[in-house]
C-alpha cells in the first residue's frame, strides 16, 4: 500500500481508489468493466469481426529469421492457436545459409507451457557463451518483477535462481559459469548488481544509492567486456570489467556530473563512447580499455549542429553512426576498409533500426526497415560494399499491396512558429476528402515515434480512415533539442504542438472535428488528457491507454515506484514554481465542467509504471464534471501490467475492442476499393 501525500489543501474525493486489493476498489473496477462490456455489446459490436480480420492478416505459423551464433542458428516459431512463441536452435549449415533444419532442431523454451491461462512476459533470454546453458526470466503478473531460471540444455534440467525482485535482465561472463543480474529496490528501481554462480548465493557487486539512477548491465559488441551503466534521465556513469575476469574490480570511465550523458561499447579500435560533453547533439570518442578515463578519450566524430548522433553500432568490419535528421534515422557507415557512405532508403517516411542477429565478426549487419504502408523487412547490409539484400519480409496474409496506401508528410505550425512534422497514411481516396482520422501522439522521454506498420490498422484504413502521427516536442523525432524543448519548463510545447497538428489536419481538409480521434498511451495519455481539457470541441473521441493523468498527485508522492527518478523529466514539486507548473497542466487536476469527447480508457491492475488508479480516478472525475453524455468507458485488465495482455491473440482482442468502440462512435467512411 502506498500512502497518498498531497501538497495542497484540496481533498481528493477519489483517493480511496488508491487502496489496492480492497473489496470496494475491486468492485468498482469490475463494475466499470461490466459497464464497458454492456455498452460495447449494445452499440454495433464488431469485436469478433475485427478480431478475425486482424488474425486473418497474421501468418500464425511462422519462423523468425534465425540469429547466427557460433555453431548454431537460434530462432523462434509461432504456431496457429498458440499465444506465445517457442524458441529453438538447430546446427548452423555448412554452406552459410539461414535454413533451419527441423529434423535436427532443439526446443529451448516453450512459453505456452509456462503461461497456462495467466499472464506471462519473457524478460531476458540469454544463452551462455559455450552454448550449454540458457538463462531466462519470467514475469507472471505484469508488475515487471521477474523470476530467474537456469536451464541445462543437454539434460533439460531447470532450476530457479535465488534472486528476489529481479528486473529480468541477465548477462553472461565468458566463463559460462558466471551470470550478472539486477534486483530492484522497494520503489521498483533497478538498483543492485549481483554476481551469480550455480549452487552459491548471489554476491552483491554494486548498489546504486541515488534514487534518480537506474542500473543496466550488458555485454560489449566484441564480447570482450561487461558494461554497467547507471543512468538518470539526464546523467550517466559507466563501469567496465573484462568478460574473462568477472570477479575483477569494475573500472569507472567518467564520474557523473549533472547533465553529462554517455554510452559505451567496445570494438576493434577499443572503447567507443557517445557523449554530450561537447554539445547536446552528441560526439563520439574512442579510448584504450587500459586507460578508459575521460582525460584519455580521443575524438572520432565531433558534434554536428544540424543532426543528433542518436546511437552507434560497432562490428569488427565497420562502425555505423545513427543520426537523427529531419525526423528520420540516417545511417552513416565507416567500413574498416573503404570510404564512409550513407545508407539509402526507398521511402520518404520510414523507420530504420540496426538489428541484431549477426556475429561480431560478420561482414554484414542486419537492418530492420518499415513504413506506414510497408511491413517490416530485414535487410543484410554488406559493410564494405554498401550493398543490401532482403533476408525476410513480414507477410500480410490475404489481399494486400503497399501501393494501395499512400504515405505523406505534413508540417503543422506551433504557436511559437516551430514546424511540427506529421506522418500520414490512408487509401488515396480517403486522403482527398474529410475522413475519420486517428491521430496518435506521445511526446516524452526523448522517445521518437518513427512510422511503423500495423496489420491491425488496415481494418481502419480499409474502412476509409486515415492514420497520422504527430511528432511533437518531448520526443526526439527531430533530434535532442526537440526533446529538451518538450520537457520540464517547456512541457506546454508538447500539448500546443499536438493541438496544432489537429488543427492543421482539419484546415487541410483531411478530417473535421466530428471525425477526429486522438490517442496516446502512458505519458502519451497525459497528452490526451491535457488537450481534451484545453480543446474538447476539437475532437470527436479519444483513446487513452494506461494514461499518466494523475501526474500532480503521483509526483507529490515519493513513496510510489519510480517517482523520484521522474523529477528530471517533469520537475521536482518541492520547488513551488515547479509544483504550480505541474498542477496547471495535470489532466486530473484541470478537469472542468464542460462537454468532453467520447473516451475509451484502459488500465492494468498490476501496472507499476502508471498505477491503475490514475485511469480509474480520472474517469470517475470526468463522469462527475462533464456536461454531456458521450460514451466514457474504462477497461481495466485485472491480470496485466503496463503493456496490456501478454498473449498475441489477447493483444489482438484488445485492439479489436478499441476499434469497435471507435467505429461505433465515429462510423465507417465506407469501404474503399
Image (cartoon, helix red, strand yellow):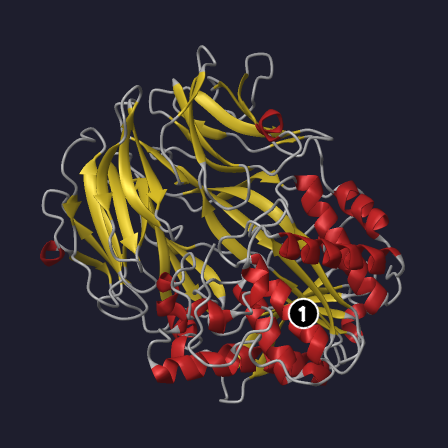
How packed is label 1: few (under 14 Cα within 10 Å), some, or many (20 or more)? some
Q: Who's the residue at 80% across and 55% down the image? A: 37
Q: Who's the residue at 55% across and 49% down the image? A: 606
Residue 206 in the image, given as x and y percentages of width and height: 22, 43
Residue 571 in the image, given as x and y percentages of width and height: 37, 74
Q: Write down the quadrant of residue 45 in the picture.
A: bottom right
Q: How many marks?
A: 1
Residue 79 in the image, given as x and y percentages of width and height: 69, 29
Q: Does residue 290 appear in this view?
A: yes
Q: Write down the quadrant of residue 601 in the picture.
A: bottom right
Asked if residue 140 lies left or right of residue 357, the reply is right
> Residue at label 1?
620
Q: Who's the residue at 71% across and 40% down the image? A: 649
Asked if residue 455 lies left or right of residue 222, the reply is right
Does 67 appear above or below 568?
Answer: above
Q: Who's the residue at 69% across and 30% down the image? A: 82
Asked if residue 281 lies left or right of residue 270, the reply is right
Of residues 56 and 645, the one drawn nearer to the viewer in this rendering: 645
Of residues 656 and 185, the one drawn nearer to the viewer in this rendering: 185
Does 505 appear above or below 112?
Answer: below
Element type at mark 1:
helix
Residue 49 in the image, given as x and y percentages of width and height: 85, 48
Does 569 appear above or below 577?
Answer: above
Q: Does residue 395 appear in this view?
A: no
Q: Can you say which quadrant of the picture contains the C terminus?
A: bottom right
Of residues 259 and 68, the one drawn nearer to the viewer in this rendering: 259
Does 74 appear above or below 48?
Answer: above
Amino acid at each position: 500500500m502506498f500512502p497518498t501525500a498531497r501538497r495542497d489543501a484540496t481533498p481528493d474525493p477519489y483517493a480511496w481508489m488508491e487502496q489496492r486489493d480492497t473489496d470496494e476498489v475491486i468492485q468498482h473496477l469490475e463494475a466499470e468493466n461490466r459497464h464497458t462490456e454492456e455498452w460495447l455489446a449494445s452499440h454495433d459490436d464488431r469485436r469478433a469481426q475485427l478480431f478475425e480480420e486482424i488474425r486473418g492478416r497474421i501468418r500464425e505459423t511462422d519462423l523468425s529469421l534465425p540469429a547466427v551464433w557460433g555453431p548454431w542458428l537460434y530462432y523462434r516459431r509461432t504456431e496457429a492457436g498458440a499465444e506465445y512463441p517457442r524458441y529453438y536452435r538447430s546446427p548452423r549449415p555448412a554452406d552459410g545459409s539461414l535454413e533451419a533444419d527441423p529434423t535436427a532442431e532443439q526446443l529451448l523454451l516453450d512459453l505456452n507451457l509456462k503461461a497456462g491461462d495467466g499472464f506471462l512476459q519473457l524478460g531476458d533470454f540469454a544463452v551462455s557463451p559455450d552454448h550449454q546453458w540458457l538463462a531466462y526470466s519470467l514475469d507472471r503478473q505484469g508488475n515487471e518483477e521477474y523470476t530467474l531460471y537456469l536451464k541445462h540444455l543437454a539434460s533439460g534440467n531447470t532450476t530457479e535462481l535465488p534472486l528476489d525482485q529481479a528486473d529480468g535482465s541477465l548477462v553472461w561472463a565468458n566463463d559460462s559459469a558466471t551470470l550478472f543480474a539486477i534486483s530492484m529496490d522497494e520503489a521498483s528501481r533497478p538498483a543492485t548488481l549481483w554476481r551469480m554462480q550455480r549452487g552459491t548465493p548471489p554476491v552483491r557487486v554494486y548498489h546504486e544509492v541515488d534514487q534518480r539512477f537506474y542500473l543496466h548491465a550488458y555485454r560489449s559488441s566484441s564480447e570482450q567486456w561487461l558494461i554497467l551503466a547507471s543512468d538518470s534521465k539526464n546523467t550517466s556513469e559507466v563501469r567496465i570489467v573484462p568478460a574473462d575476469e568477472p570477479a575483477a574490480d569494475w573500472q569507472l570511465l567518467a564520474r557523473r556530473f549533472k547533465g553529462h550523458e554517455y554510452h559505451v561499447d567496445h570494438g576493434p579500435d577499443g572503447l567507443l563512447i557517445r557523449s554530450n560533453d561537447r554539445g547536446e547533439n552528441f560526439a563520439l570518442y574512442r579510448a584504450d580499455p587500459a586507460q578508459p578515463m575521460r582525460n584519455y578519450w580521443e575524438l572520432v566524430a565531433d558534434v554536428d549542429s544540424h543532426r543528433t548522433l542518436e546511437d552507434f553500432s560497432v562490428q569488427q568490419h565497420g562502425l555505423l553512426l545513427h543520426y537523427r535528421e529531419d525526423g528520420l534515422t540516417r545511417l552513416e557507415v565507416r567500413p574498416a576498409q573503404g570510404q564512409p557512405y550513407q545508407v539509402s532508403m526507398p521511402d520518404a517516411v520510414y523507420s530504420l533500426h540496426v538489428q541484431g542477429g549477426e556475429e561480431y565478426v560478420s561482414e554484414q549487419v542486419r537492418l530492420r526497415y518499415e513504413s506506414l504502408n510497408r511491413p517490416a523487412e530485414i535487410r543484410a547490409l554488406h559493410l564494405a560494399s554498401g550493398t543490401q539484400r532482403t533476408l525476410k519480409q513480414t507477410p500480410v496474409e490475404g489481399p494486400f499491396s503497399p501501393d494501395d496506401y499512400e504515405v505523406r508528410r505534413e508540417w503543422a505550425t506551433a504557436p511559437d512558429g516551430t514546424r511540427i512534422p506529421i506522418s500520414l497514411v490512408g487509401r488515396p481516396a480517403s486522403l482527398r476528402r474529410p475522413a475519420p482520422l486517428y491521430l496518435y501522439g506521445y511526446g516524452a522521454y526523448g522517445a521518437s515515434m518513427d512510422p511503423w506498420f500495423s496489420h491491425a490498422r488496415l481494418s481502419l484504413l480499409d474502412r476509409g480512415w486515415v492514420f497520422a502521427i504527430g511528432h511533437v516536442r518531448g520526443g526526439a523525432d527531430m533530434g535532442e533539442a526537440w526533446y529538451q524543448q518538450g520537457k520540464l519548463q517547456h512541457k506546454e510545447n508538447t500539448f500546443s504542438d499536438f493541438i496544432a497538428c489537429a488543427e492543421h489536419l482539419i484546415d487541410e481538409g483531411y478530417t473535421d472535428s466530428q471525425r477526429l480521434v486522438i490517442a496516446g498511451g502512458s505519458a502519451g495519455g497525459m497528452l490526451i488528457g491535457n488537450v481534451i481539457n484545453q480543446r474538447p470541441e476539437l475532437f470527436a473521441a479519444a483513446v487513452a491507454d494506461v494514461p499518466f493523468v494523475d501526474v500532480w498527485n503521483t509526483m507529490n508522492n515519493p513513496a510510489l515506484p519510480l517517482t523520484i527518478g521522474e523529477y528530471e523529466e517533469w520537475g521536482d514539486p518541492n520547488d513551488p514554481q515547479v509544483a504550480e507548473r505541474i498542477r496547471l497542466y495535470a489532466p486530473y487536476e484541470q478537469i472542468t465542467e464542460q462537454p468532453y469527447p467520447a473516451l475509451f480508457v484502459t488500465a492494468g491492475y498490476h501496472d507499476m509504471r502508471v498505477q491503475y488508479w490514475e485511469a480509474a480516478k480520472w474517469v470517475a472525475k470526468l463522469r462527475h464534471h462533464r456536461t454531456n453524455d458521450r460514451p466514457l468507458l474504462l477497461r481495466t485488465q485485472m491480470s496485466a501490467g503496463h503493456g496490456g495482455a501478454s498473449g498475441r491473440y489477447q493483444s489482438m482482442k484488445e485492439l479489436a475492442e478499441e476499434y469497435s468502440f471507435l467505429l461505433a462512435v465515429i462510423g465507417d467512411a465506407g469501404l474503399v476499393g
